């Protein structure tokens, strides 16, 4: 399990003390809001629609039981009893008082956690595959590299004032589960001639100008990781636009200048930078690799698991949807969805967090992962423990068998919380999930990614949804645009707008027509919505969404 | 956002912000700031509203991010003219939190 080094804890405590002094100076009038704002943002403190919001970093989504209990403690003590998992594998608290946040940061520091670089034009939380170190299709464990990037980018003096925020994802699986193509820099671990390295993607991103990244290096040897990443970001830091916030992300830099130009500049910079790296990065990587050693896996029979699957249809259904193949025989990775129909996607209560911490200790080798789709994974569970784990989760309302199904919706906080939002996301997600459970079509529909954003900034990744929903303000009324055909995983694709938007009350009927049309046209149950869309094109789906237009 | 809103008698406005220490939403009223939007001062005159905004900006030790936004005359005081302000005055729709719950708690005292 990941251990926080004492020196880093000291640094985190130092930063918390610094912020306490900054808050005190803001409250006594020594700092204006204009002076204080960048300081609070550097510590993950936003001012949202109803209150302050504190975003706490969970590096690459990896969290220990004691850290999870700390989040539960913060939720119960300083918030309204819950927190919200984000699509960058972090957690947000929606209701802290400014005067309490220094105490919250102190408490976080006691378990090596913090809110540093969860906001601002810096390198944000590095994300990765939630099944890192567990997945059966893994080329190499991405976490040591993610930790190398995290420790290098934290407080990196050169990169504290980038043109815009900067997001890095790293994926270790043969299948990309980290949305590599949708990141400023995406890294895929690959092997070539027996050597480990990276396929490096650059210039992806969603937001108001969604673009998929492009491969800037087919194979980057692992020892060149930091100098090369540093070269990319240094190139962007100089050539990225600062005149227009909406054109400041690296995706615009790469697309305006062209990949060839950007690549040539990066490669030249890389030659200079590489000379400045004298091996400390490789020593650090070796240390990190030691810290992410596999747990002591058990070699035990699991006949009871198979017997329970035969005897208990609800358990079987849950194991069909909520398990992921593990590299060790007899083990599985478990997805605990925070998407029960009617629930707020990604919201976890303090009690649920404590339960997960207990279950990770009892059944999960002390390991927990926050997933980018706002669920939580226990990456290492022996199959003989699955019936007991399922029972414990079910009692807490956390055993909904819907991972990857219609109700497993990613939704940003939307206008229920976010000050940037133009419409609400959460009620739309709740209504869709409840509707498809009520009509009993969810299992028949099978794998489906619905993604909802409450504004064009696209925190809900609507462009990557098989069905994407974008909430907008149309003349003072909430209105929802639907996009089709997005994919964040196997064949990355940006969803295409289907047509005119729908008022809130017409979204569920529209999605209902769309999915019933899919069930009509699919070849068989193995053809997912996305596959059918790719085979047939948008016409039959647009016809279902807009029957009046088609009739006329 | 409606930060550049200019009130007129036909389209009046209120000044709103967040409490610096606590973060909750507040509205400017005749004797300071209130958590009850129905008690907010309704501005109909650009110059008076501008002066009030300067006063609000001068109270940065109490409030954060003041702005003037359109409101409607209601039977019990100003009412929101846009759904964003309606959510700010009520609270989120997924939980009974925010001002809607604070009002209930106050009524139960």
Image (cartoon, rainbow, N blue to C red):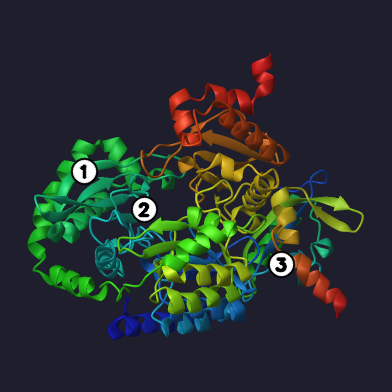
Residue depth check, mark 2 versus mark 3: number of the one nearer the observer: 2
**Residue at coordinates 44% horizontally, 29% vertically from top-left?**
A534
In the picture, the quarter occupied by the N terminus of chain A is bottom left
Residue depth check, mark 1 versus mark 2: number of the one nearer the observer: 2
Q: Secondary structure at mark 3?
A: loop
Numbered circle sitting on residue A216: 1
Q: Position of residue A333 (x, y in %)?
A: 40, 62
In the picture, the quarter occupied by the C terminus of chain A is top right
Q: Nearer the viewer, residue A47 or B91?
A: B91
Q: Position of residue A165 (x, y in %)?
A: 38, 55
Q: Residue B30 sits in which quadrant?
A: bottom right
Q: Which residue is mark 2?
A: A178
Q: Residue A440 sits in which quadrant?
A: top right
Q: Which residue is mark 3?
A: B98
Is B49 on the left-hand or right-hand side of A230?
right
Q: Position of residue A23 (x, y in %)?
A: 51, 79
């Amino acid at each position: 399990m990941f251990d926080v080094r004492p020196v880093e804890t000291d640094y985190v405590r130092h930063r918390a003390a610094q912020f306490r002094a900054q808050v005190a100076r803001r409250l006594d009038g020594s700092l204006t809001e204009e002076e204080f704002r960048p300081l609070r943002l550097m510590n993950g403190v936003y001012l949202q629609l109803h209150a302050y919001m504190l975003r706490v970093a969970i590096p690459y989504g990896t969290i220990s039981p004691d850290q999870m209990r700390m989040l539960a403690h913060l939720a119960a003590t300083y918030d309204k009893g819950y927190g919200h998992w984000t699509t960058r594998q972090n957690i947000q608290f929606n209701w802290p008082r400014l005067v309490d946040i220094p105490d919250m940061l102190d408490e976080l520091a006691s378990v090596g956690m913090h809110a540093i670089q969860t906001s601002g034009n810096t390198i944000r939380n590095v994300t990765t595959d939630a099944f890192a170190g567990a997945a059966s299709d893994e080329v190499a464990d991405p976490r040591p590299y993610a930790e190398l990037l995290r420790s290098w980018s934290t407080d990196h003096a050169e990169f504290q004032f980038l043109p815009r925020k900067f997001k890095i994802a790293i994926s270790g699986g043969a299948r990309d589960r980290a949305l590599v193509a949708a990141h400023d820099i995406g890294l895929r671990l690959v092997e070539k001639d027996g050597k480990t390295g990276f396929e490096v993607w650059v210039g992806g991103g969603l937001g108001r100008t969604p673009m998929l990244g492009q491969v800037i290096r087919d194979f980057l040897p692992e020892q060149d990781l930091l100098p090369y990443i540093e070269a990319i970001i240094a190139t962007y830091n100089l050539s990225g636009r600062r005149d227009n916030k909406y054109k400041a992300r690296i995706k615009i830099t790469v697309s305006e200048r062209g990949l060839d130009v950007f690549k040539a500049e990066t490669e030249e910079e890389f030659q200079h930078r590489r000379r400045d790296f004298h091996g400390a990065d490789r020593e650090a990587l070796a240390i990190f690799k030691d810290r992410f050693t596999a747990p002591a896996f058990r070699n035990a029979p699991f006949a009871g698991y198979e017997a329970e699957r035969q005897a208990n249809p609800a358990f079987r259904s849950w194991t069909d949807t909520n398990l992921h193949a593990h590299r060790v025989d007899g083990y599985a990775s478990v997805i605990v969805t925070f998407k029960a129909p009617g629930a707020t996607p990604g919201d976890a209560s303090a009690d649920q967090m404590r339960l997960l911490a207990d279950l990770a200790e009892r059944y999960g080798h002390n390991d927990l992962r926050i997933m980018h789709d706002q669920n939580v994974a226990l990456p290492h569970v022996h199959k003989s423990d699955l019936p007991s784990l399922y029972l414990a989760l079910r009692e807490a309302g956390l055993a909904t068998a819907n991972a990857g199904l219609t109700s497993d919706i990613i939704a940003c906080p939307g206008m229920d919380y976010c000050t940037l939002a133009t419409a609400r996301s959460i009620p739309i997600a709740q209504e869709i999930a409840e509707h498809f459970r009520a009509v009993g079509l969810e299992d028949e529909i099978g794998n489906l990614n619905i993604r909802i954003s409450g504004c064009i900034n696209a925190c809900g990744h609507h462009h990557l949804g098989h069905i994407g929903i974008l909430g907008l303000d149309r003349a003072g009324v909430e209105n929802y645009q639907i996009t089709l055909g997005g994919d964040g995983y196997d064949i990355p694709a940006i969803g295409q707008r289907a047509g005119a938007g729908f008022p809130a009350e017409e979204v569920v009927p529209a999605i209902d027509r769309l999915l019933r049309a899919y069930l009509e046209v699919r070849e068989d149950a193995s053809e997912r919505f996305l596959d059918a869309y790719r085979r047939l094109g948008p016409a039959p789906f647009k016809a279902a969404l807009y029957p009046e237009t088609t009739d006329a | 956002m409606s930060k550049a809103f200019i009130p007129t008698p036909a389209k009046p406005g209120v000044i709103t912000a967040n409490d610096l220490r606590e973060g909750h939403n507040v509205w400017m009223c005749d004797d300071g700031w209130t958590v009850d939007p129905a008690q907010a001062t309704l501005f109909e005159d650009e110059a008076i509203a501008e002066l009030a905004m300067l006063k609000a900006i001068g109270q940065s030790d109490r409030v954060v991010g003041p702005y003037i936004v359109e409101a409607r005359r209601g039977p019990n005081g100003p009412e929101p003219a846009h759904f964003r302000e309606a959510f700010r005055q009520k609270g989120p729709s997924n939980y009974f939190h925010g001002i809607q719950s604070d009002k209930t708690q106050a009524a139960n005292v």
